[in-house]
Image: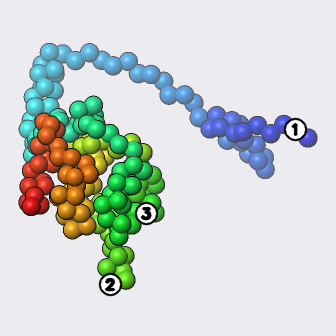
């Protein structure tokens, strides 16, 4: 019996008398050098598109992109869940069925499970949310920090601001500007 070899896109496959030829490797094409007038035009187009896209950027976006700065007091998601459940044992935490590697908080009201809109990525959670941007510097993905999840639980009236401060402390750093702006209506 012949050895079985895994096929790749470059493997000749013979089946019922016909063959699929391997895909040729693409050839590298040398780039032509831009003239000074072309460079100026390209710079003008970049500046123009940058000004158009500026309205779609977040305020303090550079701070949100700085992973080291936003990391703050990082915490593992299991420790975070234990602390939240200690504050309110009536909350449920379940793995997400739609988004692998994520979990969310739920509560039961009148025998019906309701979503709190507080979800997070399992693993190490940064203290503050971190965004990833594309080539145009527009936000494309957010990793919610544990303070954002707490804010959503406070908004859902599952935790109080006092409980959060007692268990997690209040944020007094520069990165906490968004936290303070969003939580100020719930400080009582």
**Residue 65, visible in the rendered structure:** yes
Dots 1, 2 in contact, CB < 8 A: no
Left or right of 80 in this view: 136: left
Residue sitting nearer the eye, 169 or 8: 169
- Quadrant of image for the C terminus: bottom left
Q: Which residue is mark 3?
A: 94
Numbered label attached to residue 73: none
- Looking at the picture, how far across and down is residue 117, in whole percent? 28, 63
Q: What residue do we see at 76% from left, 47% from top?
A: 15
Dots 1, 3 in contact, CB < 8 A: no
Question: Label 2 neighbourhood size at 10 Å, few (<14), some (14-19), many (20+)?
Answer: few
Splitting the image into 4 quarters, where does residue 172 fall? Answer: top left
Q: Which residue is mark 1?
A: 2
- Looking at the picture, how far across and down is residue 102, in whole percent? 41, 54
Q: What residue do we see at 26% from left, 36% from top?
A: 72
**Residue 135, visible in the rendered structure:** no
Depicted 178 relative to depicted 99: above or below: above
Q: Which residue is mark 2?
A: 110
Give the mark, 3 or 2, whose residue is nearer the N terminus.
3
User: CA gap, disc 3 to disc 2?
Assistant: 19 Å
- Looking at the picture, how far across and down is residue 16, in whole percent? 78, 50
Q: What residue do we see at 31% from left, 79% from top?
A: 109
Left or right of 9 in this view: 58: left
Give the mark, 1 or 3, whose residue is nearer the N terminus.
1
Q: What residue do we see at 37% from left, 83% from top?
A: 111
- Looking at the picture, how far across and down is residue 133, in whole percent? 26, 39
Residue sitting nearer the eye, 29 or 105: 105
Residue sitting nearer the eye, 184 or 139: 184
Tag in front: 1 or 3 = 3
Left or right of 23 in this view: 117: left
What is the total number of numbered labels drawn onto the structure image?
3
């Amino acid at each position: 019996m012949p050895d079985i070899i895994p096929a790749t896109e470059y493997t000749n496959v013979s089946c019922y008398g016909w063959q699929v030829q391997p895909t040729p490797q693409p050839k590298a094409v040398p780039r032509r050098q831009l003239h000074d007038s072309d460079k100026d035009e390209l710079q003008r187009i970049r500046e123009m598109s940058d000004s158009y896209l500026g309205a779609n950027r977040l305020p303090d976006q550079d701070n949100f992109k700085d992973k080291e700065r936003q990391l703050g007091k990082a915490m593992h998601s299991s420790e975070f869940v234990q602390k939240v459940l200690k504050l309110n044992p009536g909350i449920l935490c379940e793995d997400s069925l739609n988004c692998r590697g994520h979990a969310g908080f739920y509560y039961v009201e009148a025998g019906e499970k309701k979503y709190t809109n507080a979800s997070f990525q399992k693993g190490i959670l940064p203290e503050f949310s971190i965004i990833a941007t594309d080539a145009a510097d527009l936000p494309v993905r957010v990793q919610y920090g544990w303070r954002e999840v707490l804010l959503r639980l406070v908004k859902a009236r599952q935790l109080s601001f006092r409980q959060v401060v007692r268990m997690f402390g209040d944020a007094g750093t520069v990165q906490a500007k968004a936290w303070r702006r969003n939580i100020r209506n719930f400080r009582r």
